[in-house]
Image (spheres, rainbow, N blue to C red):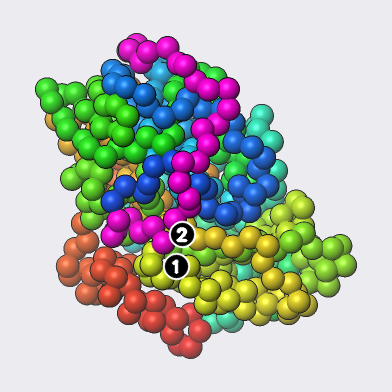
């Protein structure tokens, strides 16, 4: 397949922002996420350096073989794999600036995971044989991710990932999961007692013990996103920021994607818009995701004395065992980054009480840092599917539309693998892994019975999400 995209007249610099950052954008209530908006004020953008060159906004109508909507980790990895493996130069359309959404607002934690369910939950849902193959898909994805970042300066912090038990009552569950990982999945998870964790690894004052898993790499999300952009364009992909898809018609099998300055006519379309998937983008995507807000802060670089007093002895990253979990790590420059839940709606997201709550959480874990506040504070939407697992699929075999969505906050690593899988689907080259559940069927609508009986499905409505958060708090802190 050869592209009919016209020769690039790309600028020698990144397209500048055309509009201010909107801190209250809400994908469930608003339409397009904007046109050329400035980045969120994240640690990653503040410390990544200048964005690399792109191809500027779409200017005039064009015909292409493949259009990718979304220029984050997944969309750029799909463009890279299409060009590298199949000789297809994709055209990537981005509403705002390159990697404006999830890819520059996350915690930078590359875990050996996909979706929000544990291995034991995979077994309960699909059976042991499928769970083992799903685990292998994650292991393969981790190896592919390592290959993709081998030549990228994204401040890699390898060594694994810690699950910190925030209460003693959590330890039996962690011990059971670690045993399962070792004996059933041949994955060397190990338990570490609280005293050892706090003495040798991190003096989290809530720690009641921990499980360590061997795979996990901290990365600088902004530097990684910018490197993916360079890779994609070097292979011939075109990346057009400030080009939101504001209309979508399919005529005789050709997708007419309307942008403010021209129509992109594409033979195939891949959607990689994550938590910023608009309800108005395409009927196939409406109500398929429940976007959830996550807050993050990063401190100024701590002094060596402050790091020592806080008892942080590693740059490996941590997640506590709350349902409304915290994730944190010490960055290479000694900034401390921590994230957790946020508001329910976009309108409420800028309320300072959510930042204050996260600061309080940081001080509770590290009391010696009570004099330290955030230098960076941001929030972003996480694309949670209604069954807590992603889908990389062609939802309708009659239409050349494909999507990769629903990572549930575990997309830093798996987005590379998912982008490659999306490229395989678009190129018509799926392999044996595609009989796994995450490659079959659409993202589900929530099942009414499951919404009533299972905590995992309740967030379909925001009134349900409010009630669910109260229940989660009780489970995390009281029961």
Assess disc 2: are there few (<14), some (14-19) or many (≥20) residues with their C-alpha within 10 Å of its C-alpha.
Answer: some
Q: Are marks 2 and 1 in contact (CB under 8 Å)?
A: yes
Q: Residue at x 47, y 25 (%)?
A: 55
**Is residue 252 rendered to the left or right of residue 353?**
left
Q: Secondary structure at mark 2?
A: loop
Q: Is residue 419 above or below residue 126?
A: above
Q: Secondary structure at mark 1?
A: loop
**Is residue 410 rendered to the left or right of residue 162?**
left
Q: In terms of secondary structure, what is the magenta stretch mainly?
A: loop
Q: Is residue 418 above or below residue 125?
A: above
Q: Residue at x 50, y 61 (%)?
A: 379
The residue under label 1 is: 349
Query: Can residue 290 be seen at all in this image of the molecule?
Result: yes
The residue under label 2 is: 23
Disc 2 from disc 1: Cα separation:
7 Å
Q: Is residue 215 above or below residue 392?
A: below
Q: Nearer the viewer, residue 361 or 345?
A: 345
Disc on the earlier residue, 2 or 1: 2
Magenta residues (range):
1-30
């Amino acid at each position: 397949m050869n592209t009919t995209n016209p020769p690039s007249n790309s600028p020698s610099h990144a397209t500048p922002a055309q509009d201010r950052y909107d801190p209250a954008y809400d994908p469930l209530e608003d339409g397009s996420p904007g046109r050329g908006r400035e980045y969120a004020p994240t640690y990653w953008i503040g410390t990544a350096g200048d964005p690399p060159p792109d191809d500027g906004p779409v200017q005039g109508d064009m015909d292409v073989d493949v259009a990718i909507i979304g220029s984050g980790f997944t969309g750029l990895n799909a463009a890279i794999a299409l060009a590298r493996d199949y000789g297809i130069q994709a055209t990537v359309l981005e509403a705002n600036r390159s990697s404006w959404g999830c890819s520059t607002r996350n915690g930078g934690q590359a875990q050996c995971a996909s979706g929000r369910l544990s291995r034991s939950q995979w077994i309960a849902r699909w059976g042991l044989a499928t769970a083992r193959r799903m685990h292998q898909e994650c292991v393969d994805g981790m190896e592919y991710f390592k290959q993709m970042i081998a030549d990228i300066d994204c401040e890699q912090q390898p060594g694994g990932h810690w699950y910190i038990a925030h209460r003693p009552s959590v330890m039996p569950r962690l011990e059971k999961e670690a045993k399962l990982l070792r004996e059933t999945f041949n994955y060397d998870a190990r338990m570490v007692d609280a005293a050892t964790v706090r003495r040798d690894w991190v003096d989290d004052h809530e720690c009641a013990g921990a499980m360590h898993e061997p795979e996990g790499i901290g990365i600088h999300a902004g530097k990684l996103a910018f490197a993916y952009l360079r890779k994609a364009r070097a292979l011939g992909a075109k990346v057009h920021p400030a080009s939101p898809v504001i209309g979508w018609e399919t005529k005789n099998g050709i997708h007419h994607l309307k942008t403010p300055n021209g129509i992109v006519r594409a033979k195939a379309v891949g959607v990689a818009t994550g938590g910023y998937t608009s309800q108005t983008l395409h009927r196939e995507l409406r109500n398929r995701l429940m976007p959830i807000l996550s807050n993050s802060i990063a401190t100024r670089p701590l002094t060596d004395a402050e790091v020592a007093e806080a008892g942080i002895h590693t740059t490996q990253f941590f997640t506590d065992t709350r349902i409304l979990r915290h994730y944190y790590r010490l960055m290479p420059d000694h900034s401390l980054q921590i994230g957790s839940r946020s508001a329910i709606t976009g309108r409420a997201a800028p309320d300072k009480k959510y930042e204050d709550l996260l600061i309080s959480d940081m001080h509770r874990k590290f009391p010696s840092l009570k004099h330290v506040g955030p230098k960076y504070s941001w929030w972003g939407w996480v694309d949670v599917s209604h069954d807590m697992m992603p889908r990389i699929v062609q939802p309708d075999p009659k239409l050349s539309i494909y999507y990769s969505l629903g990572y549930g906050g575990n997309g830093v690593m798996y987005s590379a693998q998912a982008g490659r899988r999306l490229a395989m689907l678009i190129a018509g080259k799926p392999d044996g892994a595609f009989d796994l559940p995450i490659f079959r069927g659409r993202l589900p609508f929530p099942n009414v019975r499951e919404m009533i009986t299972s905590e995992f499905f309740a967030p379909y409505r925001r009134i349900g999400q409010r009630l669910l958060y109260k229940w989660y708090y009780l489970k995390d802190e009281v029961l």
